[in-house]
Amino acid sequence: MSAVVAAALLSVTGPALKAEAAALPGSIIDGGYIISDGEFYNEGAMSQAQIQKFLDGKVTSCKKGYTCLKDYTGDIEKRAKDQYCAAVKAEKSVPAARIIYVAAKACGINPKVLIVMLQKEQGLVTMNNPGSTRYARALGFDCPDTPQGCDPKYAGFSTQVYLGARQMQIYTKWPSSFSYRAGQYNTIKWAPSSSCGTSKVYIKNQATANLYNYTPYRPNIAALAAGWGTGDSCSTYGNRNFYNYYVAWFDAGASTSSGAPAQVKACTNPDEKDVSTRSGSATVKVAELNARTAPTTLCGSGLKTLKKGTKVTITGQYGAWDHITVDGNKLWVVSSYLKSTSSSSGGGSAASTGCATPAKVTSASGTAVVTVRQLNARQAPTTSCSVGVRTLTQGQKYTRTGTYGVWWRLKVGSATMWAHSDYLALEKPSSSGSSGSSDSSSKPQTAKTTAALNLRSSASLSAKVVTVIPKGKTVTVTKTSGKWSSVKYGSKTGWVANAYLTGFKTSAPTSSGSSSSGTTSSAKSSKATVKTALNLRSSGSLKAKILTVLPRGATVTVTQTKGDWSKVTYKSRTGWVDNDYLSTAKSSSSSTVKKKTTAALNLRSSGSLKAKVLTVIPRGKTVTVKKTSGSWSHVTYGSRTGWVANRYLR
């Protein structure tokens, strides 16, 4: 129940986004879809009068000495227009309905979303005796789950509502700067305690990512089975209650449940992928222990009572519960009631360290080559595993033994480790592995940052953030590669996006053919789909003015492409967007273009990270680009033809 405003760590990329089926899903058990983008950003969903009528209907009368939300009045502070919200005029002594309406319109957020957040954060909508503290923390903005609590400078109802709405647009316009991202597998905690472990969630849209960034926990089976009630020690309720209130108040037909909208049957079992692998033996340490067919005390089906000293085999862990085998039965018991007699985790569960290995791994083979300067190999396929991390270096080769999503299992010496496949390539058995020069300037230069800028461990938006360089600071540029530069800032070294540097020159990419700088223009228009909420800019540059935000799933007409950018039309607006966020944008050139690879590069059967790898093209090799589609290029290398990612070509 906190506003997460800090920059994020790496999240794992996943399959392409699918179209949203409904404004609200029938269930949120998989965690990846809570509300649609269309519903979330519909700022005109309610008028001020409709908001007031709704609030009036939730409380019949207030207790003496208290002011209910329907009767609350406060001042609206004057606020200047910025890239997230329109300008707001100062107003004195206006009702809560007015404050909600103004913030929703200014920041482009559905007022229903703000109403539900006021309820799930502080209970303000239905409470007949709210104290001043609840109004001061109304939307839970900058109220993290830490002993320090809320920041007092953001206290006050009007301030909370406006900044909470604005924060949603910050998440939307800078999706790669926060922990939870649409279109990716994300590691999400069940609860603040690390002992509860984590789960992998494929977030399907930006609105759902916003909710997780604001309240960074996923409701577990116990929380969902409880309906509106209490689950177990690893249950959290923020996102469950958001869905419960939203469906109950605004879309009663969304849920298939007969109880609370998010409720599941009491003996529902978690998906296998949400259960952390754990092996070992244990004994019951209490007089009697109930073992159940699902990890919640609400489940009474197939109940088995175990006596003190009963020996069990542990096979998995889910939050506060262990999955056990006893007398041939597979059951669930509360972990704290078992005494471990042996464990592969060496004294603590793998889940407690974030290093639980998946139950099912797909067998794979081949030799993996590290394609970046440094790559962390971990004991489990998740960045939350920080125990025994090993650093692999560019060019090193390892035997691949399995895959789990986008992670590869490698044999590193005598150890089994996991590394992210974005930074690995499969070596072709007969390839020479030769390398050439990168797209870089050999002479160091100095540059200044034009904004607060993430310094990353490699040239990728998904790479780990080493530190944040403040605006106006001087850095030393040691080399450039495409849209990225390797820089030194103080004692830190890493990669930054060129778009936020000024005062230095990048090496101009060269190409043959009629198109300069490797750009192509398409005279024939084509259709493309927006993968996530996307800025429409006045020109093909991250520095260009934002004209509007295109909603995820919107269909645009592509009329021209230049390098990494496409000129598109959406309804009555025309502007430029980054090709990386278009699913079918095409630009076909009538003449071929020669380019070089800047790293060992997978040649794939289609323009997708999930497509089959045909071969690995060594770094520095020349390929012939036949056409481009979004962030991919169709190329010929020797006798082989396939698709490669544009970012590794110059």
Image: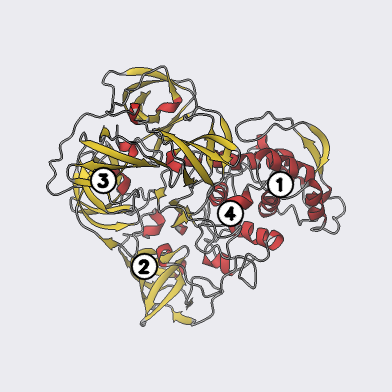
The residue lying furthest to the right in this view is: 64
Q: Amino acid at mark 1?
A: Gly
Q: Choose top left, top right, bottom left or bottom right for residue 466.
A: top left
Residue 201 in the image: above or below residue 167: below
Q: Amino acid at mark 2?
A: Ser
| x then y, percent, for residue 253 | 66, 66
What's the mark number on residue 430?
A: none
The residue indicated by pointer 4 is 36
Dot 4: what SS? Answer: loop
Q: CA distance from mark 1 to mark 3?
A: 46 Å
The residue indicated by pointer 1 is 44
What's the mark number on residue 340?
A: 2
Say which residue appears at 74% left-offset and 32% top-offset: 77
- Residue 632 at least partly seen: no
| x then y, percent, for residue 89 | 76, 31
Dot 1: what SS? Answer: loop
Q: Choose top left, top right, bottom left or bottom right for residue 341.
A: bottom left
